[in-house]
Image: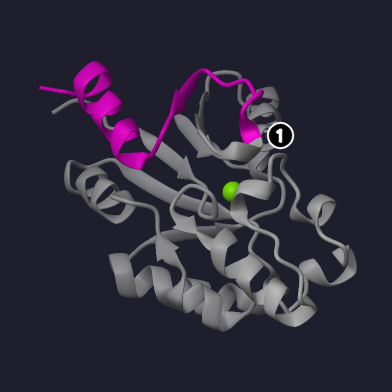
Amino acid sequence: MKNMPTILMDLDGVVFNILERWLRNYNALTGEGIQPENITEFGIHKFVKRPEIIYTEQVINDNDMMFCEFYPNAKEAIEKMMKIGMKIIFVTSTFYWCRISRTERLINEFGDVEICYLKDKSVIKGDYIIDDYEKNLIDSLNENPHIITVLVNQLWNKNCQAHIRVNDLMEFYEYLKIYRYGE
Ligand SMILES: [Mg+2]
């Protein structure tokens, strides 16, 4: 068996579709009608009338961490990666008030997982970093010149740069399996 890679995996925008719930909660609270397709740049606060509440417990909380939906095939792709021996470290900045529920959710879904709560993801080493936010990839590459950066396509990162772009985690898994770590 080949040496399997360590993958630093972001959660929101990569594994979990948190944006829909986030906007639904915000709209219910404010009466606005912001839709996911309105978010065309990273940073939800740029697109709402009340940016001061968008990153607070009023709008995003434990319930959202426990019940947010996976992107299609995300769970299956992660399970396949784990099964063939790839090491996944979930790296996310998740608001501090929802970290316990998020941890519980990940353990419920995947069992014994490794999770790092970090704002600056560049302090952690891996072979690949997969994220939906270009800044995280660039920062990581600056600190770890050998890391391979992977961007998951989203409406808010159309013009961003990375070594590899994928539409979803299953596509990333297939890429790794066929081109890098296949038999
Ligand atoms: Mg993200």
Q: Is mark 1 within 8 Å of ligand 1?
A: no
Query: Is 166 in front, or is 111?
Result: 166
Q: Is residue 162 magenta?
A: yes
Position of the N terminus, as image quadrant, is top left
In this rendering, is residue 158 above or below 87?
A: above
Q: Position of residue 52 (x, y in %)?
A: 89, 68
Q: Which residue is drawn at the image coordinates 70% and 65% (left, top)?
A: 33
Q: Where is residue 175 in the image (x, y as percent from the top left)?
A: 29, 24
Q: Picture quarter containing residue 45?
A: bottom right
Q: Give the range drawn in magenta.
A: 157-183
Does residue 126 appear in this view? no
Residue labelled with disc 1 = 135
Q: In this view, does 20 lie to the left or right of 56?
A: left
Q: Position of residue 174 (x, y in %)?
A: 24, 30
Does residue 9 appear in this view? yes
Q: Which residue is drawn at the image coordinates 39% and 53% (left, top)?
A: 71
Q: Which residue is drawn at the image coordinates 63% and 63% (left, top)?
A: 94
Q: Where is residue 160 in the image (x, y as percent from the top left)?
A: 65, 24
Residue at the extreme left of the image, as rendered? 183
Q: Residues within 10 Å of mark 1 (few under 14, many from 20)?
A: some
Q: Picture quarter containing residue 41?
A: top right
